Image (cartoon, grey):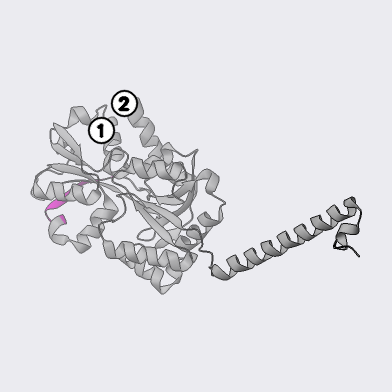
């Protein structure tokens, strides 16, 4: 035989076919080796569940860091997911986040809830002293004489937030019933962006009167009696739907939303949940119908007609 190999003696077409097969085999083996090496170099990792985000407005007692930590721990235990508590200075900021779906749910106020009814869905409402209701208080210095709330005409008045039901709307509606508006009734007014700050403003003399969440004032009365003792209630509103927990309407059936809702509604059923409720001075959370906030909606319309 000549020095040619066996393959050289094959017809040219068959030689090309065999060379292609050898190349494909080499490429396949090289690829498998690469995949094996990558798999060996990369450790297996457990997939982390997607975090939940829960927004809180100043209606919540956000200054209590121990309470926030305990609430976060409870929600994480019950949902088996990381939970991020989102706080902002104003009601508008938190309302925008929940309406746009940037947070999974938020504890908001009845006033922004009725303003965005078409975009929001109720998840839960707190129960305080046996009912899902609370009041707005008009407060003044403890030594202020007179029992008629109208004595505050011409005052420097402290409001909580322009989107707060108890910290603005209720007082504006009370004035609207008499054909008046805050700008004409008070000598001056300002926003404290926190119900506790309203109490502090009146107690310190920075404001002569203020509009405050009755639930917050009552809790402060237990925790800071010396501070609330420097104020007194001039007027208590009718009973209104307690500030609710809501989510964006399109997220109402989402898994994350359901996890948060179940955790809130079941808070009184566990020791860690009851600990949170005790710090909040609440009985628990309940489901509620949209009609709970109809009286707030009527106040909105009254103020709009008078403005």
How would you rate the neighbour count of disc 1 (Cα within 10 Å): few for under 14, some for 14-19, many for 20 or more?
A: some
Compared to residue 162, the image places residue 292 above or below, namely below
Residue shown at the point (42%, 37%) measured from the top left:
115
Most frequent secondary structure within the magenta stretch: strand
Q: Could you tell me which secondary element the residue under label 2 belongs to?
A: helix
Residue 271 shown left or right of residue 178 in the figure:
right
Q: Quadrant of residue 145?
A: top left
How far apart, in angstroms, are the residues tagged by discs 2 and 1?
Answer: 9 Å
Q: Determine if residue 147 is in view.
A: yes
Compared to residue 51, the image places residue 37 above or below, namely below
Compared to residue 217, the image places residue 35 above or below, namely below
Q: From the top left corner, tell me how far across and down residue 272 is, in percent.
A: 39, 71
Residue shown at the point (89%, 54%) measured from the top left:
14
Magenta span of residues? 228-237
Q: From the top left corner, tell me how far across and down residue 210 is, in percent.
A: 19, 43
Residue sitting farthest toward the bottom: 271
How would you rate the neighbour count of disc 2 (Cα within 10 Å): few for under 14, some for 14-19, many for 20 or more?
A: some
Q: Which residue is mark 2?
A: 306
Q: Could you tell me which secondary element the residue under label 1 belongs to?
A: helix
**Residue 236 belongs to the span the image colors magenta:** yes
Residue 221 shown left or right of residue 267 in the figure:
left
Q: Determine if residue 280 is in view.
A: no
Q: Which residue is mark 1?
A: 175
Badge 2 vs badge 1, beta-carbon distance below 8 Å? yes
Q: From the top left corner, tell me how far across and down residue 16 is, in percent.
A: 84, 53
- Which mark is drawn over residue 144? none
Quadrant of the frame with the N terminus: bottom right
**Residue 128 belongs to the span the image colors magenta:** no
Residue shown at the point (13%, 37%) measured from the top left:
156
């Amino acid at each position: 035989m000549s020095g040619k190999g066996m393959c050289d003696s094959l017809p040219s077409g068959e030689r090309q076919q065999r060379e292609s097969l050898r190349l494909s085999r080499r490429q396949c083996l090289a690829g498998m080796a690469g995949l094996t090496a990558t798999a060996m170099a990369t450790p297996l990792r457990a997939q982390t569940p997607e975090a939940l985000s829960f927004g809180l407005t100043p209606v919540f007692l956000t200054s209590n860091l121990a309470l926030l930590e305990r609430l976060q721990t409870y929600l994480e235990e019950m949902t088996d997911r990381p939970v991020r508590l989102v706080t902002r200075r104003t009601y508008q900021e938190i309302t925008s986040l929940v309406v746009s779906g940037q947070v999974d749910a938020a504890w908001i106020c009845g006033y922004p809830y009725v303003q965005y009814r078409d975009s929001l869905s109720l998840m839960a409402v707190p129960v305080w002293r046996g009912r899902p209701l609370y009041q707005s208080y008009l407060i003044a210095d403890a030594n202020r004489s007179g029992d008629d709330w109208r004595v505050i005409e011409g005052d420097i008045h402290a409001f909580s937030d322009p989107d707060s039901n108890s910290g603005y709307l209720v007082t504006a509606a009370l004035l609207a019933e008499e054909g008046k508006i805050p700008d004409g009734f008070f000598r001056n007014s300002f926003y404290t962006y926190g119900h506790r700050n309203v109490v502090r403003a009146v107690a310190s003399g920075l404001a002569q009167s203020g509009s405050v969440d009755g639930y917050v004032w009552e809790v402060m009365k237990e925790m800071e009696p010396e501070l609330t003792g420097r104020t007194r209630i001039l007027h208590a509103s009718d009973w209104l739907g307690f500030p609710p927990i809501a989510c964006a309407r399109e997220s109402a059936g989402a898994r994350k939303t359901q996890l948060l809702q179940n955790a809130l509604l079941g808070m009184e059923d566990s020791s860690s949940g009851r600990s949170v409720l005790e710090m909040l001075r609440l009985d628990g959370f309940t489901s509620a119908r949209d009609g709970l906030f109809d009286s707030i909606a009527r106040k909105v319309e009254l103020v709009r007609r008078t403005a």
